[in-house]
Image: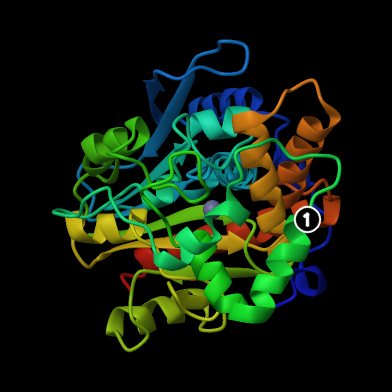
Amino acid sequence: MFDLFVKSPPASNYSSFFSPDYFISRARFVEQAERAGMTRTSYPIAAKGPKGEMLSIDVARLGPKKPEKTLVLSSGLHGVEGYLGAAAQLAFMQRMPALKPGKGVAIAIIHALNPYGFAWNRRVNEDNVDLNRNFLLEGEVYEGVDDSYVELHDLLNPARPPGKINAFVAKAVAQIALKGMRKMKQTFSGGQYEYQRGISFGGKGPTESCEIVKANLSSWVGDAKRVLHVDYHSGLGKSGTYRIFADRQESDEGFKKLARIYGADFLEPWGGELSYNIRGGLGAWCKERFGSDYDVLCAEFGTLPPILVGQAIHYENRAHHYGDPMTPEYQAAKKRILAAFRPDDEAWREAVVSRSLAIADQSLAALLQDD
Ligand SMILES: [Zn+2]
């Protein structure tokens, strides 16, 4: 895998695009959208921030209303992962006046698809739902859980806050030794629709964010025939590396086309080398709704080893549902989730924003070149 830190450009203050919280991130997004002359729409959600603040999904758009092609950049589908995505968006928008997308190409930038998770530093939304498991396809029902998850439910989701001494990592390592890393990742992350306080819960129906996307995405992309939609994520893969997951088979001609745009080494199908198969993903839903020429590119930037990311998700979930915010254990769990998805590391931040921008540029260049 490509090492970002070797080839990243000289320091250019990209890390300054990271914001300290959702509210500052949103304010910067709004200000930059206005400066770049973009049209902007705000979609408030019912859930509120930690101090009762309003929360919203915000969309900024540039270019024709009915373009032939659209570039979409979205952030925060997984709440706390929005720090990275929003930083990438801000860096991209800052250069917008110089970009001149060109005739027939529009740009739509979606800030914080899961504003609650971003504001509260959770991956999931106000109903504990992983939004990238919530976009079920026509005819699918919000039910079901794999037997392997049921088997691990007690380990993954004990109904108590994390204590002073915890055995999760030791137990998870034993399970990995028994079942293999691949199987464990799939079980942990694939999505389940039965345990509402559990990890990777896909919901009991479409969430408010999901409904907003379903009702408005066609106007954001302006019914374009060809859409490249980069959805930024963090937390999967080796630190300093990235991969792009596409909802296509490797043998598919469209996959080969994407490989030419993003580089074959960085692109993989869902369920490939690094990822797992998911139900209810945004990308599959977009394909069903808009057709094969709509590609969601899930750009994943690595942070910590998977066992530590799993540990962070596990403790934060328990702390959130059963913990007391005044205890050191709760605060440690909250700190851990930030370390796993928004590392406090200048070199990492420089590199990920630089690479995120490169992915946005590759996408725009491909759309302009008619690829
Ligand atoms: Zn994610």
Q: Residue furthest bottom?
A: 251
Q: Residue furthest top?
A: 52
Question: Residue 236's x, y, as percent?
Answer: 62, 63
Q: SS at mark 1?
A: loop
Q: Residue at x 27, y 35 (%)?
A: 211
Q: Is 8 in front, or is 329?
A: 329
| 277 horizontally vs 105: left or right | right
Question: Residue 154's x, y, as percent?
Answer: 58, 53
Q: Residue at x 77, y 47 (%)?
A: 339
Say which amino acid is labelled 1: Ala
Q: Is 93 in front, or is 297?
A: 297
Quarter of the image with the C terminus in it:
bottom left
> Is residue 157 placed above or below 357 in the rendered structure?
above
Q: Residue furthest left?
A: 139
> Is residue 114 placed above or below 231 in the rendered structure?
above
> Is residue 70 placed above or below 86 in the rendered structure?
below
Image colouring: rainbow
Question: Residue 61's x, y, as percent?
Answer: 38, 37
Q: Is residue 307 visible?
A: yes
Per the image, the residue denoted by label 1 is 167
Q: Residues within 10 Å of mark 1 (few under 14, many from 20)?
A: few
Q: Is residue 365 visible?
A: no
Q: Residue at x 73, y 56 (%)?
A: 168
Question: Residue 197's x, y, as percent?
Answer: 50, 39
Quarter of the image with the N terminus in it:
bottom right
Q: Is 156 in front, or is 199?
A: 156
Q: Give the number of callouts.
A: 1
